[in-house]
Amino acid sequence: MNPNKKTYKRGLSLMALFLLTFNLIQAQQFNLINKESSLTVFGTSSLHDWHISAEQQSGKIIFKNLEAGEITTCTIDVVVESLKSGKSSMDKNTYKALNSSSYKTISFQLIAVKETVNKGNGKFTIKAEGDLTISGVKKRIPLDFSVSVVGNKITLTGEKKIKMTDFKVDPPKALLGTITTGDDITIKFSTIFK
């Protein structure tokens, strides 16, 4: 075989190997799948406990190293007026309390991962902090969640307790103030990225 052809073939092989390796170590991005994800807010009132669920979410997650569970970016946006309780009067009170005419989305942006624990089989527990923005008020919060990686599907699950007043949201009232909502709420999520 011609020495030039050998060099050319060796060069092509090295280039193919380099591209393959580069693609494997390159950051991997997954996008939020709205129809498979759930986010529900649970609260209390002077009458009964309540919950309201998000029907429209978007976002993305980017891994520096998927096998090690190393997350570099995670953003989630919830359309405020997609929060539905099944009761239109409660929904209207919620949108009013969240000032949805001025602030259309609730957003979370990951700022730092403090700890990643590999549980094996593509499962991780994460201690992180991020910026949660509600009704135009941004606060840095700690957030613990679990990550499950199965093929090209990433699942984030967890829950977070917050106070509405920390975000300058007055807990909604109904029936001329005779029904009052508790300040403490719990957000539970199961977020799917593909």
Image (spheres, rainbow, N blue to C red):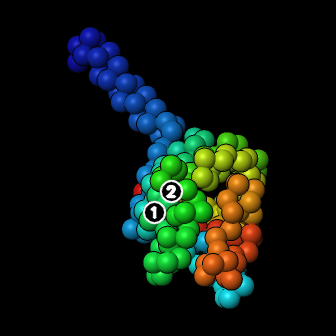
What residue type is disc 1 on? Glu
Q: Residue at x 64, y 74 (%)?
A: 173
Residue at screen point 67% across, 77% down: 177
Name which residue type carries label 2.
Ser
Q: Place residue 18 in its image quadrant.
A: top left
Left or right, 41 with reference to 78: right
Q: Position of residue 124 (x, y in %)?
A: 66, 60
87 on left or right of 173: left
Residue located at (40% from left, 30% from top): 19
Is 24 drawn above or below residue 89 in the view shown? above
SS for callout 2: loop
Q: Is residue 40 above or below residue 13?
A: below
Residue at image coords 53%, 76%: 90
| Crowd band around label 2 with a 10 angstrom C-alpha radius: few (<14), some (14–19), many (20+) | some
Q: Which mark is residue 139?
A: none
User: Which quadrant of the structure image shows residue 42?
Assistant: bottom right
Q: Mark 1 — residue?
A: 81
| Residue that label 2 marks | 100
Please state which of the two labelled residues, at mark 2 or mark 1, is closer to the viewer: 2
